[in-house]
Each structure stands twice: as structure tokens, then as C-alpha cells.
């Protein structure tokens, strides 16, 4: 498998009922090169990856690997041929060790017997070879891993059988900066070994850090392939959206009003002594690394996690939520991090999802008023510019950005004045991102108190009037808009534990 | 991709597709299947189309229909209740016993089993919500437990005699506007549940809990209360079915007439397109599915098919219904289904 293979796809066309997802796209991925594959959601990236991986079969077009025509009818075909797509969502067996997960399906066995000791040693060697030795311990039980470590495990698992073409699909979404550095070092090593690497990410900064060239898709067509060093961020964005988004973080400061949300020494199971305020017409960002406790804090504010001590005040009155409904009634709306899993009823309509939190208000004697419901839904669809054929469209058929707008619409419909937005632009394409930033700004201008949790520093800096930084369950600092820089935020986010991203090797009980 | 090709709204195909969407593909296929099956059976045995036989099918599907309709609600919420048959048996036997003990007090003989249905449903709900047991396992346990209770209180024998009471006679054999009273009970219960699901907050919450319980919770739905309600509803409707069993047979039956009904209830729901993973389903489709089941089982009897084949046919139908559902969901066929 040492020969250098170029992956070439020509004239790839794939249509689904009503949509042409890919329209005779020609792409090639050269050995020894990192090619960033970019495009807005719906541009055809995932369809292309699925075709390359054998999940879908193209309607027409050819794929060749190292000059030979190939046809993959399943991901295992693709894997055998030396092509590996690393999934965004790690699929990991929870109650076995990291080593077992690494060799799942191909345990090193003698006459059917597997030696744990031998496997652990082999895993340690492989982890070392790939550069992840400090981050993953072969004997650790997978369930104890952090989300970042799980993602790394998924990556490691794909790399141990030396694929010639490796595709990373948003690999950094749950990684902290330190882990990203390690991953990038690994990617650079793979490039040196002559592997062809496809890198899919919405994060422009990463593309400049790691990629050699950029291939951009828009509306199912190839826009172009360019060398990274000849491009600026604006160029790429323009290629992706076909328009200039230089005012992406257009943000006007509004004079903040009275304090709407006040936390005083709030302690939950995950966060400790958290105190801060959010005023009307103010956007406060909560920055920090993944796992710092921000999401848990958001859930506590929304009434879904118990507050053990300290107090939470809304408009000057103490709020003791036992359920999310208590918080909702006081005007708190949470757009959770995992939109599909936690916010949306995917198989129900846009209208149903928007109305979900206000049904009690638009119902008389328990009967929901269809007219009021439709009116509310169409108001939000118009106000937020939700792109959907009709309000009776199922939410699962919308793009990520429009799904997020449906979640925002739910809270606007219920008149929430305190919005807690956890990673509001995760999985949202660049064009819709700018739109969501604008909406957040407008909401603040209209008097809402907004708390935005974000791991994307440009987003934090672009949006916030004030930045709170959390680390390990504590607030480690507060920065004003004027003084906040990426460096200062990162320094606070990693104040205590610069080197603890690596797992503490555990003494594991083997099953 | 016919539904997305752009056509002037006035064109015939456009109107046809709009009609199909409005009626629902499930309903249309079910009605077609019922028609084809009825014609096939009728061509072999003309007795099938006699009014008496149609009425017999109607009465036959009432018990199954009640249970299937309420099972649909449980399935929409993302659960399942396989104890419905046992609750019906317990209710049936209590009806007979209370009737005998209360010297023919018919309303008391209905109230007590209904309360027992509430208690059974509440127990199921509490075990599921607070015991953290999946509905399948919880109600598998109470399937056995409630049946045991019915046998214990009755010593395993039929109880009481309601066959001479005018109220029970009217329930079992009376007619209103040429339609058997039994069928009216199903129509009323099904209509009430349909309205509840479609037009009330409660119904919308049930769809939301089945579609995504976390999203429902974070949107302020008290999901525990909704789950308890649905199991109680299942208990009550099962009890109604049990009372009707007693009315039809003239005495309280601990197992006969109700045993195995959970199977038909789930089949009815699944055949009507209720998604076993929750969030989707409709009472109307379930009723069509129940009619299909009734016609099939009646036809098999009319055509003299060995009754043991009926069990095989029921099982085959359940598998077919769910397989069709799962294949159209586009899930990858790998490993254990979720």
C-alpha cells in the first residue's frame, strides 16, 4: 500500500427527488496534499463524500484511485481499496478499552484467542506512531473518555490500517486547541507519507493552517480548486456564497438596560460559584474550552439541571426552577448545543416546532387554536427569513441554518426576553451564520438579554459586548468588548490546566 | 419524483397528487387492500357480503379496534403497552363479579372495572417513568401480572351473569341507526381520541414526546405527566374493551376473549403506519388497519381455513407491516435496529 494514489472523480452527478445534489462535478485529491473541501450546507459536500465512501452510488460519473477505475457499493469496499472517511459523530463501543475499540473487527488473535496484553501493547505502539500517545491511553475504558478523546479515538481507528486517502469531516468540532494542534501535526505527517487528505471544515482559520489547496462547491457545482496561499478568507467566503460577506460580524453596540438575568454564586453538579449578570440589550458571550461546564450552566439556567446553591434572579426576582417550564414562564429560552437531539422534533413540521413552547398559551380548554398557531408560525418564518416551502414542511428537510432559525423562532414566539444560545452557529454554513449573527443583534437591539455560548473565538469577539471565560466549572475572567482578544480569552480558558488535556491513564478493569 | 415536478395546479395529476397527500398514502393503500381482499373473499363465498356477516365483522373488530386505537396513542408517544389484553381480561372478570355482588347494579359493574383500568395504567406508567424500565419490558411483566390477578380473583373461571340485564343486552346486541351499539362505542372512543390527538395541546405534546422527548422537555412539556396520562388512557380504554367482552359473552372472562389481543392491537397500530419509534401515527389509519384485519380473519373463517393459520397470518402481517415501515425509513440495514 505504499504506492501514491490520486483520487479522481469525474463528471459526478447525483440527484434526489426534486434536487440535483451534484451536477457533473470533477474533483481530484492528490497524494501528499491536504485538500480542503468547502461549501455552504447543501452545496453537495456530504453527498460527494458519501459517493466517494460508497454510501451512495452516483447517477453518472467515474471514480478512479491511483489510475484504476473503482466502484464502491459500500463503505467496506472503499475501505478495502484504501479510502477512509472519518465520521463526524464517533461510533464507539462504550464499555471496552480504547485498544479494543481501535482494533474492533480485526482483533489480533491466535487461534481465536485475543491477548489483552498484546493488544494493549500494540495499541500503545500505534498511538505513539500516530502522535496521540499523550492524549489517549490504550487501557482506558471508552465510556470514561471526553468527547474530544472519543473523536480522536475515531480518527486513530481510521488511521491504523494506513489508508491512502483519508477524509476528515469536521474533525475539530469537539476538540480544544491543544488537541487540534496534535491532530494537525498528525495530518501533516500523513501528508509527508504521501497520503491524499480531504479536509472538510467550516472553520476558515483551520483551512489556512492545514490545507494546501481548497476545492469549493456551491449548489452542487464545482466552483474551483485553488492553492491556499493565493487566497484570503474573503476569497474563500466569496467562492462559497458567491457574494461578499465582509460585514459578517456587523454589530452595533446598544446601551444596555436594566439587569435581566443575575447569577450569584451559582453552584450545580458541574459548575462552581458562578456569578454574572446579563442586561437587556446586551450580548454576553461565554467562552471556554469544550468541557468547561458552559453547556451544563446553560441547562441549569434553563431549569433542566438543579442549582445546588447560590441564586438565580430574573428581573430582580429569585427563580427556583424545578423544570424547564418554570424557566420558560419567566422568559428564559434555551437554544441547546445539539439542535437535532435536544431542540427539534425532526419529523414534525416547522409550524409544530415553532409553536411547541406556546401551545398552552394559544389553547382554549385544551384545544389548540389553529389560526393563532399558523399566524405565529408565519410571523416567525417571515421575521427570521426561514427558508422553507411551507410551514407544513418537516423540520428534518431544512438546512442546519434554517433549523436553528426554527429554534430561535420558538422562543421569539413565546416572547422570551432572556435567550441562552449554546453554539448557535454550529453546523451552520457561512451565509446563514451571518444571518444568525444579524438576528441575534436585532434581538438584543429589541431589548433581549442574550447569553451566547461559543467555542469559535471570532464569533465571540464579533458578537459580544462582554466576554465571560469559563474553565473547569469556574468563571476565570471577564473581558470587555474593547479589551477582548483571542489570546486573552484563550489564556483565561486554559488558566489552570494547560497540560491536562491528556487523559490521566487509568488503571482499568478488563471486562 | 412526481410530487415535485412543477405542474399547473389545475392539471388533473396535480389535483390527484394533492388528493393523495390529503388522504394519506397509508389510508389509500389500506382501503385498496380492504377492497381487494373483500372482493377476493366475496368471490369465493357470497355469504361474505350478507348484512349479517358485515355486522358480525363490525362487532368482531370492536374489541380489537378499541385496543388498537389506544395502542396507537402509546406508540405515537414512543412507547408500547402489551398489557392491554390482560387489563381487558381483568376488567371483564371484575364486571361480572361486581354485577353479581351488587345485585345487578349495572353502572357499578362498569365503574369498578374502569377504576381498575386507571389503576393498572397508572401502575404501568409509574413503573416506566419512575422505575426507569422500558415500556416493552414493564408491560411484558404486567401482561403476566394483570392476567394472574384476573385469574386469582376469579379462580380462573367465568364470573357472574349479565346476559339477562337489558343494559348489557343493548350493549351487546342493540342497534342505533342500523349500526350495532358495540360499533358505536368504538366510533365514539376513536373519535374522542382522534380529536384529542389532532386538536388539543395534550395530543400535540404526545406527538412531541414521541418525536423527541428532550426537545419536548426543554420546551416546557411535563413529559412525565404526559407519559402517565397515556398509560392511564390505555388502561381505561382496555377496561372499556373488557366491559364489552363481558357484555358479548354474558359473563366476566379472565382470559378468554382478551388473551392475545395485545398482538392485534400492536399489529393494528403498525399496519396503520404508526412509527414504532414514535412521533407519527393516526387513529383513522389504525381503524382502517383494524378493518383490514377483521376482514382477513373473518374471510379465513368463512373460507374454512384451519384456525391455526389465523395465528400465522396475524404474525406475518405484523412483520410485514413493520418491515414496510422500516424499509421506507431508509435506515441502514446493519446490526440491531434502534
Image (tube, helix red, strand yellow):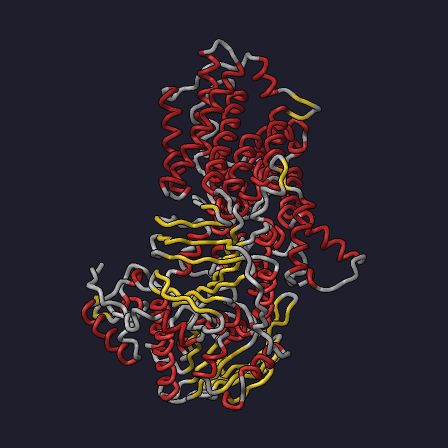
The reply to whether residue B92 is in sight is: yes
Q: Nearer the viewer, residue A259 or B97?
A: A259
* Spot occupied by residue A506 in the image (x, y as percentages of width and height): 22, 64
Compared across the picture, whether A247 is left or right of A420 comes to right
Q: Nearer the viewer, residue B63 or A194?
A: A194
The reply to whether residue B316 is in sight is: no
Image quadrant where one finds the N terminus of chain B: bottom right
In the image, residue A279 above or below residue A114: above
Considering every residue shown, the one lying at the far right of the view is: B10
In the image, residue A250 above or below residue A282: below
Q: Nearer the viewer, residue A12 or A278?
A: A278
In the image, residue A150 above or below residue B296: below
Image quadrant where one finds the C terminus of chain B: bottom left
In the image, residue A411 above or below residue B82: below
* Spot occupied by residue A363 in the image (x, y as percentages of width and height): 62, 40
* Spot occupied by residue A406 in the image (x, y as percentages of width and height): 59, 58
* Spot occupied by residue A415 in the image (x, y as percentages of width and height): 59, 51
Compared across the picture, whether A32 is left or right of A245 comes to left
Residue shown at the point (51%, 53%) measured from the top left: A260
Compared across the picture, whether B152 is left or right of A457 comes to left
Residue shown at the point (52%, 53%) measured from the top left: A333
Residue shown at the point (56%, 12%) measured from the top left: B165
Residue shown at the point (79%, 56%) measured from the top left: B12
Amino acid at each position: 500500500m505504499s504506492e501514491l494514489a490520486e483520487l479522481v472523480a469525474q463528471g459526478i452527478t447525483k440527484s434526489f427527488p426534486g434536487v440535483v445534489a451534484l451536477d457533473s462535478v470533477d474533483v481530484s485529491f492528490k497524494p501528499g496534499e491536504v485538500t480542503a473541501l468547502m461549501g455552504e450546507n447543501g452545496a453537495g459536500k456530504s453527498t460527494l463524500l458519501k459517493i466517494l465512501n460508497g454510501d451512495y452510488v452516483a447517477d453518472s460519473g467515474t471514480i478512479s484511485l491511483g489510475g484504476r477505475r473503482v466502484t464502491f457499493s459500500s463503505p467496506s469496499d472503499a475501505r478495502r481499496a484504501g479510502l477512509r472517511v472519518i465520521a463526524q459523530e464517533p461510533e464507539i463501543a462504550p464499555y471496552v478499552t480504547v485498544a479494543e475499540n481501535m482494533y474492533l473487527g480485526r482483533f489480533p488473535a491466535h487461534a481465536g484467542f485475543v491477548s489483552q496484553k498484546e493488544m494493549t501493547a500494540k495499541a500503545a505502539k500505534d498511538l505513539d506512531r500516530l502522535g496521540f500517545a499523550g492524549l489517549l491511553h490504550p487501557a482506558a475504558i471508552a465510556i470514561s473518555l471526553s468527547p474530544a478523546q472519543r473523536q480522536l479515538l475515531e480518527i486513530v481507528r481510521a488511521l491504523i490500517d494506513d489508508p491512502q486517502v483519508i477524509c476528515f469531516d469536521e474533525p475539530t468540532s469537539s476538540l480544544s486547541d491543544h488537541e487540534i494542534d496534535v491532530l494537525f501535526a498528525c495530518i501533516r505527517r500523513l501528508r509527508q507519507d504521501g497520503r491524499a487528505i480531504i479536509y472538510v471544515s467550516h472553520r476558515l482559520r483551520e483551512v489556512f493552517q492545514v490545507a494546501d489547496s481548497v476545492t469549493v462547491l456551491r449548489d452542487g457545482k464545482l466552483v474551483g480548486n485553488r492553492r491556499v496561499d493565493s487566497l484570503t478568507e474573503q476569497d474563500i467566503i466569496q467562492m462559497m456564497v458567491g457574494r461578499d460577506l465582509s460585514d459578517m460580524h456587523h454589530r452595533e453596540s446598544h446601551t444596555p438596560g436594566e439587569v435581566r438575568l443575575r447569577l450569584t454564586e451559582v453552584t450545580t453538579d458541574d459548575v462552581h460559584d458562578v456569578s454574572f449578570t446579563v442586561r437587556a440589550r446586551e450580548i454576553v458571550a461565554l467562552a471556554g474550552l469544550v468541557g468547561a461546564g458552559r453547556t451544563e450552566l446553560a441547562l441549569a439556567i434553563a431549569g433542566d439541571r438543579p442549582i445546588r446553591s447560590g441564586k438565580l434572579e430574573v428581573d430582580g426576582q429569585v427563580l427556583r426552577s424545578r423544570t424547564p417550564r418554570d424557566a420558560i414562564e419567566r422568559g428564559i429560552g434555551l437554544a441547546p448545543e445539539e439542535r437535532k437531539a435536544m431542540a427539534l422534533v425532526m419529523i414534525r413540521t416547522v409550524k409544530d416546532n415553532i409553536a411547541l413552547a406556546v401551545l398552552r398559551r394559544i389553547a382554549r380548554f385544551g384545544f389548540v387554536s389553529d389560526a393563532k398557531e399558523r399566524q405565529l408560525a408565519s410571523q416567525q418564518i417571515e421575521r427570521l427569513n426561514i427558508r422553507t416551502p411551507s410551514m407544513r414542511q418537516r423540520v428534518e428537510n431544512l438546512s442546519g441554518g434554517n433549523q436553528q432559525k426554527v429554534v430561535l423562532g420558538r422562543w421569539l414566539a413565546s416572547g422570551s426576553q432572556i435567550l441562552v444560545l449554546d453554539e448557535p452557529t454550529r453546523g451552520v454554513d457561512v451565509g446563514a451564520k451571518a444571518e444568525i449573527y444579524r438576528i441575534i443583534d436585532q434581538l438584543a437591539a429589541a431589548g433581549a438579554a442574550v447569553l451566547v455560548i461559543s467555542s469559535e473565538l471570532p464569533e465571540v469577539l464579533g458578537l459580544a459586548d462582554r466576554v465571560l471565560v469559563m474553565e473547569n466549572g469556574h468563571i476565570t475572567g471577564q473581558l470587555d468588548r474593547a479589551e477582548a482578544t483571542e489570546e486573552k480569552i484563550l489564556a483565561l480558558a486554559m488558566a489552570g490546566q494547560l497540560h491536562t488535556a491528556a487523559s490521566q491513564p487509568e488503571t482499568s478493569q478488563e471486562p | 419524483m412526481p410530487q415535485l415536478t412543477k405542474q399547473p395546479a389545475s392539471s388533473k395529476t396535480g389535483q390527484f397528487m394533492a388528493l393523495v397527500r390529503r388522504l394519506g398514502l397509508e389510508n389509500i393503500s389500506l382501503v385498496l387492500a380492504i377492497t381487494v381482499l373483500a372482493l377476493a373473499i366475496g368471490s369465493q363465498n357470497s355469504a361474505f357480503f350478507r348484512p349479517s356477516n358485515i355486522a358480525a365483522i363490525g362487532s368482531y373488530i370492536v374489541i380489537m379496534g378499541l385496543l388498537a386505537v389506544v395502542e396507537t396513542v402509546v406508540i405515537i408517544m414512543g412507547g408500547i403497552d402489551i398489557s392491554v389484553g390482560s387489563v381487558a381480561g381483568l376488567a371483564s372478570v371484575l364486571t361480572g363479579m361486581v354485577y353479581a355482588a351488587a345485585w345487578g347494579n349495572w353502572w357499578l359493574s362498569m365503574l369498578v372495572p374502569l377504576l381498575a383500568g386507571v389503576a393498572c395504567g397508572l401502575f404501568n406508567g409509574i413503573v416506566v417513568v419512575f422505575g426507569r424500565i422500558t415500556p416493552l419490558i414493564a408491560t411484558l411483566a404486567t401482561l403476566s401480572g394483570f392476567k394472574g390477578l384476573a385469574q386469582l380473583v376469579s379462580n380462573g373461571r367465568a364470573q357472574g351473569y349479565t346476559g339477562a340485564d337489558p343494559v348489557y343486552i343493548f350493549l351487546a346486541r342493540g342497534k342505533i341507526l342500523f349500526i350495532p351499539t358495540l360499533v358505536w362505542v368504538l366510533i365514539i372512543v376513536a373519535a374522542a381520541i382522534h380529536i384529542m390527538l389532532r386538536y388539543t395541546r395534550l395530543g400535540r405534546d404526545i406527538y412531541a414526546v414521541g418525536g423527541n422527548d428532550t426537545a419536548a422537555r426543554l420546551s416546557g412539556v411535563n413529559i412525565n405527566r404526559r407519559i402517565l396520562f397515556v398509560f392511564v388512557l390505555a388502561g381505561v380504554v382496555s377496561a372499556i374493551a373488557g366491559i364489552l367482552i363481558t357484555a358479548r359473552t354474558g359473563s366476566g372472562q379472565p382470559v378468554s376473549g382478551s388473551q392475545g389481543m395485545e398482538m392485534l392491537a400492536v399489529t393494528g397500530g403498525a399496519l396503520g403506519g404508526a412509527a414504532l419509534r414514535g412521533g407519527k401515527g393516526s387513529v383513522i389509519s389504525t381503524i382502517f388497519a383494524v378493518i383490514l384485519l377483521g376482514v382477513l380473519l373473518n374471510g379465513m373463517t368463512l373460507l374454512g381455513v384451519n384456525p391455526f393459520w389465523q395465528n400465522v397470518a396475524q404474525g406475518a402481517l405484523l412483520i410485514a407491516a413493520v418491515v414496510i415501515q422500516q424499509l421506507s425509513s431508509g435506515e441502514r440495514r446493519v446490526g440491531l435496529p434502534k
